[in-house]
Image (cartoon, rainbow, N blue to C red):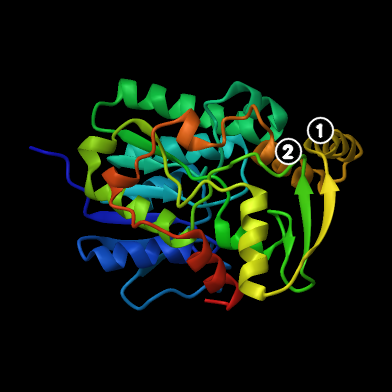
Amino acid sequence: MALQIKSVMLLGGSGTLGPFIIDALLQAGSFDVSVLSRPTSKSTFPPNVKVHKSDLSRASLTDVFRGQDAVIDLIAQGSLEDRKRYIDAAVEAGVKRFIPSEFSSNMENEANVALIPPLFMTRVATRDYLKSKAASNPNFSYTVVSNGPFYEWGLNTNFLGFNAKECKAVIYDDGTQRFSSTTLSSVGKAVAGILSKPAETANKGLFIASFTPNQNEILATLEEITGKKWAVEKASTTEALQQGREKLGKGDMSGFFQLLIASTLGPENGNNYEESATLSNDLLGLPKEDLKTVTKAVLEGN
């Protein structure tokens, strides 16, 4: 009998990405969606989403995962041991598909992984652990999603180097390095697409992207939309990498921001998915998206 996914549980779900995945799953109309939250959580969800509570212990997770076809881990922060506990509970409970909390840059590129060892090596180790569990448990499978930075989040938080409120931009190097980025809604649709095509997406790392611009193109788009000439500051990904490492060495966690910039915009890190990977947009039924249209919507708060 062909693998089918019906019941889907989100481990976490109130963060940046969770609402978009929930919406896409509900819009698909073929999934029973539930969310697992900590006992103290005050988060609310749509009325047709069932909410379970758990202290995230192995026993509690195993119990609540029973009867679920798929589990999506959306807990952003966690150690490798945390990730293994979630996966072990899913395997023991008979879960068919596990999607780990990654949703980021190219973890198949060694140079990229080496930039932020505490974070990226945990993601690689999680992938390896999933592979080993799938190999020894034929009814268990996984899918990993690489989508680059969330585009709306990147603009709204100035992560991509653009401050829309002040019409200021920080352009790294010469601004021509292309990087793949995906809208939150498309990431949500990608997850729904994965679970709608479980056989085609089993035990794979999939790359998706709404577009693959460079900073100069985004700046030109922003200037066109706002009708203003933006103030531009020049910066270096090499210096960002050095400064980020120095900050982390002193216990200053803000250094992660500069390391992530160096990862996203560095030339050898494989984050131009159109060159370094095969995009799964068509497989997952993702819509075509236009940089200007999406950017304008973000600026308007939509």
Nearest the viewer among 27 and 210 is 210
Residue 3 image offset from top left, x and y in percent: 16, 40
> How many numbered discs, if any?
2
Q: What residue lies at 56% left-to-right and 25% top-to-bottom?
A: 109
User: Disc 2 on helix, strand or loop?
Assistant: helix
Q: What residue lies at 56% left-to-right and 57% top-to-bottom?
A: 151
User: Disc 1 on helix, strand or loop?
Assistant: helix
Q: Considering only order in the chain, which callout, 1 or 2, is on the residue closer to the N terminus? A: 1
Query: CB atoms at circles 2 and 1 under 8 Å apart?
Result: yes
Q: Does residue 160 lie above or below 206 as drawn?
A: below
Q: Which circle marks residue 93 in the picture?
A: none
Residue 301 image offset from top left, x and y in percent: 57, 77
Q: Which circle marks residue 262 in the picture?
A: 2
Q: What is the distance, in whole Å, between disc 2 and disc 1 at their CAs?
A: 7 Å
User: What type is the residue that disc 2 sits on?
Assistant: Ala
Q: To which quarter of the image does residue 268 belong? A: top right
Residue 15 image offset from top left, x and y in percent: 55, 62
Provide the residue designation for mark 1: 238
Q: Is residue 241 visible?
A: yes
